[in-house]
Amino acid sequence: MAINMLETLISNRADGSQTKAYEKRAAILQAAHNVMLRYGFSRVTMDDIAKECGISRPALYLFFKNKQEIYRATTRVMCDLALDILKGELAKDGSPKQLLF
């Protein structure tokens, strides 16, 4: 199952608004997710993420200070997505065991 963090981040913004900076940050996280899945965290550089996103490396540093910060942000998004899916499943009728398995 492919995860489109960009779409989810933009559609789930708490206040419903989407600023250009917020959309760019979401695009960076999606690009980082893509390259980290492709090459692994250790091999990915900030330059790889910037290229995947179509921005310069200095522009990337305006949003995130390092690769670890990007990784933490992508992990946070993935956890939020998983929690949203779980909450949706548990809101359905049936026992939790039936709903999850």
Image (cartoon, helix red, strand yellow):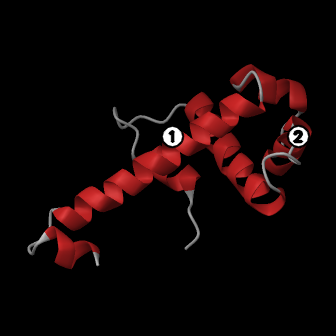
Mark closer to the chain start, 1 or 2: 2
In the image, residue 40 sits, relative to residue 95, either above or below, namely: above
Q: Quadrant of the N terminus?
A: bottom right
Q: Is residue 12 left or right of residue 35?
A: left
Q: Quadrant of the C terminus?
A: bottom left
Q: Is residue 82 left or right of residue 27?
A: left
Q: Nearer the viewer, residue 18 or 46?
A: 46
**x, y percent for residue 64:** 71, 25
Q: Which residue matches tag 2?
A: 45
Label 1 and label 2: CA atoms lie apart by 20 Å
Q: Which residue matches tag 1?
A: 76
Give me the residue at 67% from left, 39% from top: 71
Give me the residue at 84% from left, 45% from top: 42
**x, y percent for residue 27:** 66, 45
Q: Amino acid at mark 2?
A: Thr
Verify CB contact (< 8 Å) between mark 1 and mark 2.
Answer: no
Give me the residue at 84% from left, 38% from top: 55
